[in-house]
Image (tube, rainbow, N blue to C red):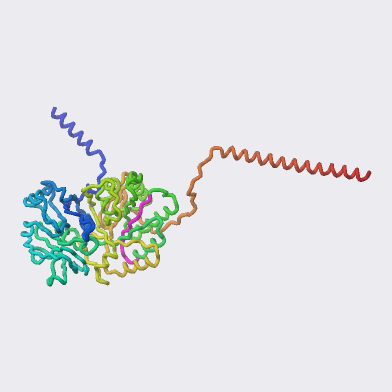
Amino acid sequence: MRKVYLFVTLLVLLCTLSVPRLTSAAESTNAKDPVLLLYDSKALRTPLAGNVEALQRLLAGFSTPVTMLSLEQYKEGKLHSFNKVILVRNKSDELNLPDAFLQDLKAYSGKYMQIGSGLPNTIQQALHLQEQHTVDDTINLKISDLNQTSIAVSNMAWVTSFEGKSYGTVKSSKHPAEAPYSITSGNYGYIPYLSKGNLSELAASYVLKDWLEVSTAPQHYVLISDIFPFSNLELVNAMADRLYEAGIPFVASIQPVFSNWDYPAMQRYMETLKHLQARNGSIIVQTPIVDSTDSPDVNKLRNELGSFLDHLARLGIVPLGVSAEMYWTYDKHYAIDGLSFFDSGLILPNQAVQFRDPSDTAVAFHSTAYTIDANELLRYMDEGNSLNPLPMNTAIAYSFPNDASKLETLLTTLTSSWTTFDDYKNGGHSVQTSASKFSSQNGHLLMNGQEVHLNNQIQDVDAAHVYVQQEEKSLSGLFSVQNKILIVLIGTTLFLFGLFLIIGHRMYKRKYMQSWRQ
């Protein structure tokens, strides 16, 4: 009986292992501890609006799994399910925290960070923290080689004394001594001020890196976004050549196309992508634009995106990741049907949030890069200086200009920069469909385990194309025969009519001549 039991158990195990299973980005080899992100308010219609979203994107940039929860929804014991907890305090007029949360915090032994004032007493004591509060002020913020002046703040805590490590400095005319922007000590971290859209968003990443215990060396990439089939492809190819000659590797974010692959415009687009790839460009796929969550196209996302990736495979084009607005990672539908092909991603700021199946838990890519617009980054840098490494992998984004003069300005900016940019394909990236597997390894592009041959020769595409195919008509043969018969009949009739006309004319002439002689 025991042998039968063991045999059945072994058989079930073998069957289980043999069933293929598609893993999502959240189920990748990412072994980082998840973070519980609590907030008392999202500060809508206030100067702090968007700081929770900014923090979400920073955590995504560190490939950190996140579970979000409003403090009003907190239940006893939730804190002890996580080793790392971040609380965002945006309600400056309400300093009381829920009793269930405070009781759990007293017994909590994990890592705790707070953004915004009103630290619990136990943590203030652990940090030996003393601070003042400023109601309305203007500060100058500096961290590493980045700085920004004249930032308007309200109800900001000003650290005057602490024990631990500090990050950055803030100055103000109302405070004679400069203060640290943020601090850490042991398991605790504290950021008094965070707002979306200014330097504080990047400054928070410096303390987050240490608090999250991220030890990997960060990479900087050039990201050229918004490359479409209807872009000026000649300029795209020229840009790739110039960057290649300057020794600048780049990442090209391309728009997927789900139909009409046989059109000349689409074929020229594919030739351009092959050229980008051959010119040290890494291809990543930009997620489709979501116009409406009620659109039937949303339901076809998985099949269409998978088909596009397989079409790239047939042409020898190797995509290495995806670029997506951050809300995609907080949506079950988009995460499973759109992002699960990829284990690497670039996290873009939200532009137009179109949730379909929202989730409080975000997927995290195995390899992620935080994106920042190049013009925004320039606001924080002194002219002519090179950029020191930022705490996380960062893609500095330039939107491709469909204008020769603007492209020249972009290329001049890049080729004259002293900043060293990294090659995206030097990292380990993987994209997989049911039929194809793409990857990169030590700078080499692989497809289904075989190295891909790079060809920078752009093939000419014949513009002649029948865009609307005519349906074959089953009676066309019969109509053709009928036409020929009618032509013969009409020709015969005309011939006979002409013959009768000539005979009639002669008979009339003969009769006329006889009557004239008489």
Q: Quadrant of residue 239?
A: bottom left
Quarter of the rendering containing residue 461: bottom left
- Label total for image: 0
For the magenta stretch, what is the residue range? 245-257
The C terminus sits in image quarter: top right
Question: Is 120 or 424 nearer to us in this picture?
Answer: 120
Residue 133 image point, x, y percent: 12, 64
Relative to 333, residue 281 above or below: below
**Position of the N terminus by quadrant:** top left
Left or right of 7, for residue 279: right
Q: Residue furthest front?
A: 93
| Residue 454 seen in render | yes
Specify the farthest residue to the top.
Answer: 1
- Say which residue appears at 10% left-offset and 64% top-offset: 131
Magenta includes 256?
Answer: yes
On the image, the x and y values in percent for residue 309 come to: 34, 49
Residue 352: image x %, image y %?
30, 54
Q: Residue at x 18, y 54 (%)?
A: 41
Where residue 462 appears, as percent x and y from the top left, is 47, 54
Residue 149 is one of the magenta-drawn residues: no
Specify whether 265 is left or right of 321: right
Residue closer to the observer: 283 or 45: 45
Residue 460 lies in quadrant:
bottom left
- As drawn, which residue projects farthest toward the right? 518
Going by the image, does 151 lie left or right of 486? left
**Residue 61 in view in this figure:** no
